[in-house]
Image: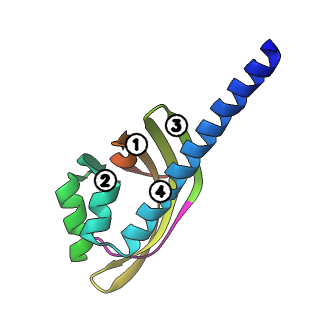
Amino acid sequence: MKTILTLALFLSATFAFAQADKDLASQVEKLRLALIDPTAATLSELSSEKLTYGHSSGKLENQTQFIEALVSGASDFSKMAFENQTIQVEKDVAIVRHNLAAVVLDGGNSNSIKIGVILVWQKEKGQWKLLARQAYKLP
């Protein structure tokens, strides 16, 4: 009986972590799509009001600046893929790492970029929200 109870607890914990990973992966995919086709509503829904958004250039933005840059077209992605993604969930906080490969439109010119990114997500009222993002140059 003790073995069955232990096994049941293990399986339920494994399922809970798998579900958290799946829910978070869904949010990350929504973010990727929103970066390509941004709307203020979608970006607000995905990000925390406390957002710190760091670019590989060192530029930092808060939630308002992050949304404005995308919606205005100042940051304009035509294509984007998240490669080699890993997700680490610990209770209500998660760390997502990936390489971002994208085509950026800059003044009508198309440029390809590939950078590393770390995302910190936190559950707010049952929803995963992007709390912090930092991009960095790959070696």
Tell me where residue 42 appears, x and y as whole percent.
32, 66
Judge depth for marks 1 and 3 and give the one in front. 3
Mark 2 and mark 4: Cα distance apart in space: 11 Å
Which badge, 1 or 3, is on the more N-terminal residue? 3
The residue at the point 49 percent across, 46 percent down is 96
The local secondary structure at tag 3 comes to: strand
Judging depth in this view, the residue of 40 and 62 nearest the camera is: 40
The three-letter code of the residue at mark 3 reads Val
The residue at the point 44 percent across, 51 percent down is 117
Residue under numbered circle 2: 47
Judging depth in this view, the residue of 93 and 71 nearest the camera is: 93
Please indicate, yes or no, whether residue 55 appears anywhere in the rendered image.
no
Q: Residues within 10 Å of mark 3 (few under 14, many from 20)?
A: some
Q: Which residues are magenta?
A: 74-82
Kindly indicate the quadrant of the structure image that contains residue 32: bottom left
Which badge, 2 or 3, is on the more N-terminal residue? 2
Residue under numbered circle 4: 28
Which badge, 1 or 4, is on the more N-terminal residue? 4
Mark 1 and mark 3: Cα distance apart in space: 10 Å
Which badge, 1 or 2, is on the more N-terminal residue? 2
The residue at the point 37 percent across, 76 percent down is 37
Q: Which mark is residue 89?
A: 3
Tell me where residue 119 appears, x and y as whole percent.
42, 47
Please indicate, yes or no, whether residue 97 appears anywhere in the rendered image.
yes
The three-letter code of the residue at mark 4 reads Val
Q: Image check: 86 left or right of 138?
A: right
The local secondary structure at tag 4 comes to: helix
The three-letter code of the residue at mark 1 reads Val
Tell me where residue 23 appears, x and y as whole percent.
52, 51
The three-letter code of the residue at mark 2 reads Ser
Residue 98 among those drawn in magenta: no
